[in-house]
Image (spheres, rainbow, N blue to C red):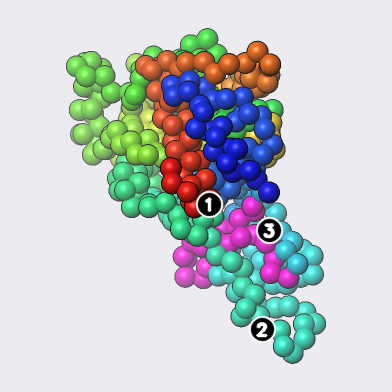
Amino acid sequence: MLDLNRIGALVSARRPGHSLPQALYNDPDVLEFDLQAIFGRSWILAGFTCEIPRPRGVLALDIGRSPVVITRDREGVVRAFHNSCRHRGAQVCAEGPSARARLTCPYHQWVYDLDGKLVHARHMQESFDPAEHALKPVHVEVVAGAIFVCLAENPPAFDRFRADLEPLLAPHRLEEAKLAHRNTLVEKGNWKLVMENARECYHCASGHPELCLTFPVEEANGEHFATEGDPRHEAFAARLEAAGLPKGPHVGPWWQVERFPLKEGQLSLTIDGKLACNKLMIGGDEPDVGSLRWAIEPHSFCHSTADTTVYFSAMPTATGETIVTCKWLVHKDAIEGVDYDVERLIELWNVTNMQDRDLVENNQRGVNSVGYTPGPYSESDESYVLRFVDWYCDKALDFVAETTGTDR
Ligand code: 3BY
Ligand code: FES
Ligand code: FE
């Protein structure tokens, strides 16, 4: 049994504006708590509709310890289910994308339709009612080709987020994309350290020499990218307006959405700043549209340039372990070896993610020290880390109050 009062006290005792108390980064009970209070109650960016092409596309992923499976039923409606068989609970679909007409549990071959209905269960007695043993649904929302799921019975309100994201993301035509590559990285660090690192560019100039060619690391340090009165930003805004592309920024309690200019003369977030794919994902033929950064607490950020969308997601697997999943999308008609080269497409983010892994693992080692004391964040350069940590503490204390029936 989790001692919610103890964890609530730990969160309440944190010093605002500072990194968190040690136990919040390395205590096994806190990880269990985070899975319930945070990952169990937030909208998670699970993937993209192009990963579940009609009619047989299926995508399975783990949200903490809870496997989820996403399908499109015969009518094309996207659905999500707990990926746990209604017989004896086995995981029905293996993690990752696959193509299936039905979902067959590998254990005793119970068969489910893509809408979750149980359609076949061998040798069950007369009294057994298949209608009572459909896969359990999980809340799902689709925004411009991006799929969000939430394990909670009552998920957080979604409408404001949708209104902020949809007009900015829709021009990237994710419905017409394909998954060009996907990989994972295991990081020996708590998920919060992975996300704090992902929410700032204070470390970018020294930590990511390759990213610095294209990513405006200095501008990314503030609250958002737009810099008033800067002629380059004004020219960028005018170009976007001509191309009919809204740029935001939109910042909500658990999201940030903003289109920003890349470094001068660079077209994509690649190792050389050139396009990674000649067939554009964005409508029109203007490739110089910067990048749309869309980031969702607790676990992800994406960058959508004219030619690709890159997805980064961090999932806790154990107290000191996080799995980072990266996906690269390109236009579905782009031909590998002709329009794009996978090695070149993935090189920059692979290099960057591995540099971040080393930074996170090093951070975790230092945080484990008996000499660790929470230290101050930079208000200017780590503003999104401050937001993340404040959001985490707020959500954690809400969970404690609701679950224990006490006031905050
Ligand atoms: O959220 C982002 O944009 C990531 C990418 C590079 C650094 N970090 C702030
Ligand atoms: Fe799925 Fe038995 S656990 S068929
Ligand atoms: Fe980084």
Residue at image position (66%, 80%) is 130
Quadrant of image for the C terminus:
top left
Q: CA distance from mark 1 to mark 2?
A: 34 Å
Look at mark 1 in the image and give the residue it sits on.
403
Question: Please, what is the three-letter code of the amino acid marked with disc 1?
Answer: Thr
Circle 3 residues within 10 Å: few <14, some 14–19, many ≥20: many
Is ligand 2 within 8 Å of the beta carbon of the residue shown at mark 1? no
Look at mark 3 in the image and give the residue it sits on.
93
Is ligand 2 within 8 Å of the beta carbon of the residue shown at mark 3? no
Question: Please, what is the three-letter code of the amino acid marked with disc 3?
Answer: Cys
Q: Position of residue 32 (x, y in %)?
A: 65, 43
Q: Residue furthest front?
A: 406
Is 76 inside the magenta-drawn segment? yes
* Residue 170, visible in the rendered structure: no
Mark before the other along the chain sequence, 3 or 1? 3
Front-most of 307 and 195? 195
Question: For residue 356, which quarter of the picture?
Answer: top right
Q: What residue range appears in magenta?
A: 66-87
Q: Residue furthest bottom?
A: 126
Is 211 inside the magenta-drawn segment? no
The answer to whether 23 is drawn above or below residue 332 in the figure is above
Look at mark 2 in the image and give the residue it sits on.
129
Question: Please, what is the three-letter code of the amino acid marked with disc 2?
Answer: Asp
Q: Position of residue 55 (x, y in %)?
A: 54, 65
